[in-house]
């Protein structure tokens, strides 16, 4: 994945709270709409601990600092090609530019959603959250939250190959949840829905499909210059790495479809591919099919 070196990055779409670790936060829970966070939370309940405990951090993702420092560091596409944190800024810009143009004529105008970089713990409209829950979207405050150290965990603990587009897939998936929030799709799903054909699984697979739709049009947004077949393969690999069946087999030794909340590895790959091949969100109606 290569950014246009002359593209102007908009860091106002990202709040950089790295290094601002909070403690003693009030209780709460992350509601529906978290990308991999709900999977990890489920594992924590099953195992009495969290497989990502101790993860997170920003050692390879730039120096923690204020939003103004991020604005100084991440100015152009050239910076996005050189730095991981700037790359995420560029992906956020591209995803939001895409959905702004795509949703404008459908009666549901796109409203920008801020991405929040954090380390350790943070407070959200959905309650207190730590880096252990993974990237997630909070519909209560309309923000995407991510500890950038998750991308290292995606490789070391989930077995993904990684790469720039694997990171982009994660961000695009979370913004898929924001699109669902705008369209009112989130309201169709109960917060505690589980099972292989549950509303939660359909919601997550649709967000994967929306990520594929963005990928199809990413080079039209003015930020991303090119995507290769290898990039798409990295995205599909990341989607597979966070499939319910793969994570359950790894961390609990067996697959229990009745507790799925996100879908299998094969399903996540298939729906991303569906979005990418069709390039249209109309192809992403996971709620209208019996064949997930």
Image (cartoon, grey):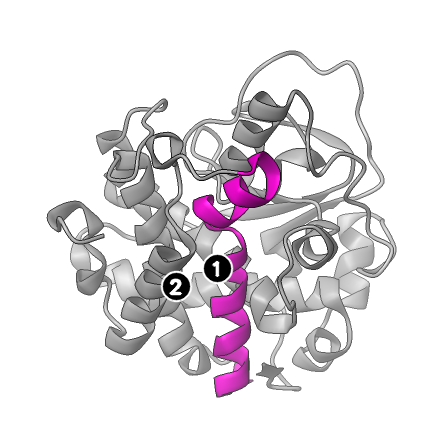
Where, by quadrant of the figure, is residue 274 drawn? bottom left
| Residue appearing at x 37%, y 60% in the figure | 266
Secondary-structure class at tag 2: helix
Q: Nearer the viewer, residue 231 or 180?
A: 231
Residue range corresponding to the magenta coloring: 224-253
- Mark 1 Cα-neighbour bin, 10 Å: few <14, some 14–19, many ≥20: many
Residue 68 at x, y = what percent? 79, 53
Residue 110 visible in image: no
The residue at which mark 2 appears reads as: 269
Dot 2 and dot 1 residues touching (CB under 8 Å) = yes
Q: Distance from label 2 to label 1 (Cα)? A: 6 Å
- In reply to whether residue 252 is colored magenta, the answer given is yes
Lower sequence index among marks 2 and 1 = 1
Residue 76 vs 11, above or below: the answer is below
Q: Which mark is residue 240?
A: 1
Direction front: furthest residue: 253
Residue 193 visible in image: yes
Residue 130 at x, y = what percent? 69, 30
| Residue appearing at x 45%, y 44% in the figure | 244
- In reply to whether residue 161 is colored magenta, the answer given is no
In this image, 239 relative to 120: left or right?
Answer: left
């Amino acid at each position: 994945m290569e950014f246009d070196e002359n593209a102007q990055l908009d860091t106002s779409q990202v709040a950089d709270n790295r290094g601002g670790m909070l403690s003693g936060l009030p209780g709460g829970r992350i509601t529906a709409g978290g990308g991999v966070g709900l999977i990890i939370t489920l594992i924590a309940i099953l195992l009495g601990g969290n497989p990502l405990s101790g993860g997170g951090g920003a050692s390879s993702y730039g120096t923690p600092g204020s939003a103004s420092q991020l604005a100084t560091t991440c100015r152009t596409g050239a910076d996005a090609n050189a730095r991981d944190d700037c790359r995420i800024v560029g992906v956020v810009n591209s995803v939001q530019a895409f959905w702004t143009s795509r949703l404008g004529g459908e009666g549901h105008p796109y409203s920008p959603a801020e991405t929040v970089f954090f380390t350790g713990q943070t407070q959200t409209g959905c309650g207190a959250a730590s880096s252990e829950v993974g990237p997630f979207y909070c519909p209560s405050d309309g923000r995407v939250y991510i500890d950038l150290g998750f991308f290292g965990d995606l490789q070391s603990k989930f077995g993904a190959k990684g790469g720039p587009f694997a990171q982009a897939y994660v961000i695009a998936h979370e913004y898929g949840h924001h699109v669902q929030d705008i369209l009112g799709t989130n309201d169709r799903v109960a917060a505690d829905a589980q099972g292989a054909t549950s509303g939660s699984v359909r919601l997550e697979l649709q967000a994967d499909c929306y990520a594929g739709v963005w990928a199809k049009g990413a080079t039209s947004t003015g930020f991303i210059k090119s995507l290769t077949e290898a990039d798409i393969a990295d995205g599909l690999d990341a989607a597979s790495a966070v499939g319910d069946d793969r994570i359950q087999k790894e961390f609990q030794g067996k697959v229990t479809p009745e507790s799925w909340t996100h879908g299998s590895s094969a399903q996540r790959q298939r729906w991303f591919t569906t979005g990418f091949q069709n390039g249209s969100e109309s192809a992403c109606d996971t709620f209208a099919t019996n064949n997930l």
